[in-house]
Amino acid sequence: MTREEILTELVRLQPWFHRIALGGGLYTKTESVMGEPVDHPAKPWETIGKCLPEDLTGKTVLDVGCNAGFYSIEAKRRGARRVLGVDGQRQHVRQAVFVRKALGLDIEYRRMNVYELTRRRVGEFDITLALGLVYHLKHLVLALENLYEVTRELLVVETAILPPKRTPKSFTHPVGRAEMRLHPLAYVENPHGAKEQVFNWFLPGVEALTALLRNTGFDEVEVFEVKNERAVVVCRKTRARADSDVRQHYVAALALEAGPPACHPAEELSFTLRVENAGLARWPARGDEPDGRGAVHLGSHLLRADEEEVAWDYARADLPRDLEPGETAQVEIKARAPAEPGRYVVEFDMVAEHVAWFEDFGSGTLRHELVVEEP
Ligand SMILES: C[S@@+](CC[C@H](N)C(=O)[O-])C[C@H]1O[C@@H](n2cnc3c(N)ncnc32)[C@H](O)[C@@H]1O
């Protein structure tokens, strides 16, 4: 890009929050937009740079809330193999894409909200950065779970916190029947209609922040620095977490292709469903000997319209073959209609034999209304 082209884009894409050197004495910004130092984020980078390996050769890095890409660029300069920067605001992705072009760097950018981050959508990253992000999150726990899901080794969180001098101490108190630790976390009252990605929502005390990150699943949560009402926390995954992985494995997408909405009492019924393995592990059509443990089947429950249970184990059908993540299959399931006329619901769900119904892991079921007519 010529100097003139760069200068034109710098004006077109302002205001800038990140000051990034573009060469030839040009910088993305020359003045503060919201009270931050003009050279932001040079100062926080001094700390965050110490949390990351000097050499990122071969590593993959995800920068969530990447803004104009300052940290993504630094990760790339340390040798990261793949860097993906995502930001919920289009304006910042446009800035980041322009800076990438001006600097000729191989970095991926996507406009994406933290709530959309899943392993299936973006993959898994050795290192995830969540810098200046946490206090913008209205759905804080959901976002932390997503960050956990896409992180393989290390998550670095940098955030504004409850002012330490004004933060009440954590204390133990009975909640229900158990003695629990309660940690202060503040809700920031906003004007009606406040835009999530711009306004602030929760300011955690440091102890609330570390408890949240531990409960999300990180094995080691280390407070790296607390300074000027901000904290840098480094979170590590040191072992596979069977429980959270299982939740990712048993995910199905079910669609009804054919099946009667009405029938006669005790009639033989046939439903055809398209089942998709929307999880992360293969579904075996056959399980382990001797009881078939682990085999994945299409199952169903029969309920009355008012949710009263008629038959929990209503009908089952085998998969035609093992299904890899992302694969679909057509499955026919046969059942006998109830003898008593009335309004019913057939609720389809996948089941891993002797393990669980998928619904127990948060997977969606498919509900089909069935009217059994008077004879
Ligand atoms: C305070 S800035 C921090 C930018 C950069 N990470 C830093 O530390 O300098 C917050 C950034 O997070 C983005 N952001 C806020 N909420 C988000 C969300 N829910 N999903 C993705 N990005 C979000 C904003 O658009 C903004 O670019």
Image (spheres, rainbow, N blue to C red):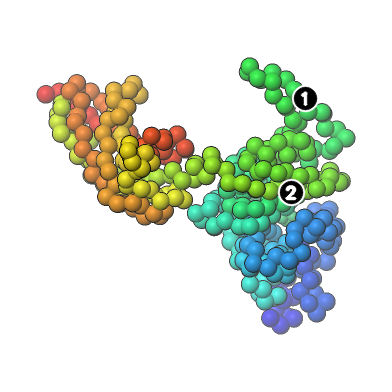
Q: Residue at x 44, y 40 (%)?
A: 363
Observer-nearest of 270 and 6:
270
Above or below residue 323? Residue 15 is below
Above-or-below relation of 120 to 309: below
Residue 375 position by quadrant: top left
| Foreground residue among 188 and 7 | 188
Q: At label 2, which amino acid type do we have?
A: Val
The residue that disc 2 covers is: 234
Q: Marks 2 and 1, Cα distance to the nearest angstrom?
A: 24 Å
| Neighbours of disc 1 within 10 Å: few (<14), some (14-19), many (20+) | few
Instruction: Please tell me which residue lies in front, 270 or 277.
Output: 277
Asked if residue 15 can be seen in this view, the reply is no
Q: Amino acid at mark 1?
A: Phe
Residue at numbered disc 1: 171
- Determine whether, in the image, residue 143 is placed left or right of residue 293: right
Q: Residue reaching furthest left?
A: 375
Front position in the image: 341 or 54: 54
In the structure shown, which secondary structural element does the residue marked by tag 1 occupy? Answer: strand
Query: Residue 47 location in percent, x, y?
Result: 82, 55
Q: Residue 118 placed where, x, y %?
A: 54, 51
